[in-house]
Image: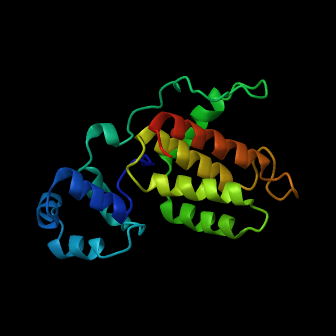
Amino acid sequence: MKPAAQIRTISQLKTLLREREISPEKLAKELKISNMTIRRLLMKDDDAILPEKYHAQFDRMLPADRTGGSAPQALPEVEIDENAMGLDMRPFLLQIEKEGAAYSDWTHLRSELKKKWEDQNLGGSLRAAAKKLHTLITSNEIPARYRSLSVGALLYLINPVDLIPDVMPAVGYLDDFAVLSLVFGMIRNRSSLS
């Protein structure tokens, strides 16, 4: 599977053009894609997903350090207490990061997130955290490793059979909230996001 830190949305494509300071025409020439194809893609909404047949071509345009290709490293010391309940969360967070880095089915993730956002049992704070993480993974505001953690946390949220099954009334989303809050807190502390 492909790493999560790749060009998958129109917003990321626009950012690539801005960062490299190249025209759509030059990009089309470099990628050996029709100029008109690039123009049509740029006319779509920023959160639109790029057609899968172009993924490999766009990914070649990324610098090596943004492709997410390296294996997860040990998590840095964080300012929040990962051992809050006497549990060492590092192995769990490394697993979340690994799953997030390997994930590539963006259509499925988006579809499942929309279903979760419509779930009346999902609290407002959890919904807001999930939406913010979703926004971050489609932007270039965070480094690849935190993007992988974010994707992994969202995958945990959409999985109905996790530590506390989501179907359990009142408590089903407690573990999901803890995971998203932990990941979001790590990102905020490391990336100085507001």
**Residue ID at (61%, 51%):** 155
Color style of the picture: rainbow
Viewer-proximal residue, 34 or 174? 174
Query: Looking at the image, which is closer to me, 76 or 156?
Result: 76
Residue 181 relative to residue 34: left or right = right
Drawn side of residue 151 relative to residue 160, left or right? left
Indicate the quadrant where residue 11 lies: bottom left
Query: Where residue 9 sits in the image (x, y, percent)?
Result: 38, 62
Residue visible at 48% across and 40% down in the picture? 146
Quadrant housing residue 88: top right
Where is residue 149 shown, x and y percent of the image? 54, 41
Q: In which quadrant of the rendered view does residue 123 lie?
A: bottom right
The residue sitting at 50% across, 66% down in the picture is 107
Q: Which of 102 and 87 is in front in this view?
A: 87
At x 36%, y 68%, the residue is 51
Q: Can residue 104 be seen in this view?
A: no
Give residue 48's position: percent from left, percent from top. Answer: 41, 69
The answer to whether residue 111 shows anywhere in this view is yes
Above or below: residue 152 compared with residue 7:
above
- List x then y, in percent, for residue 131: 58, 59
Query: Seen from this angle, which residue lies furthest right?
Result: 169
Would you place residue 59 above or below residue 109 in this image? above
* Numbered marks: total: 0
Which residue, as the protein is rendered here, is positioned at the far front? 194
Up the image or down, 86 lies above or below 52; here it is above
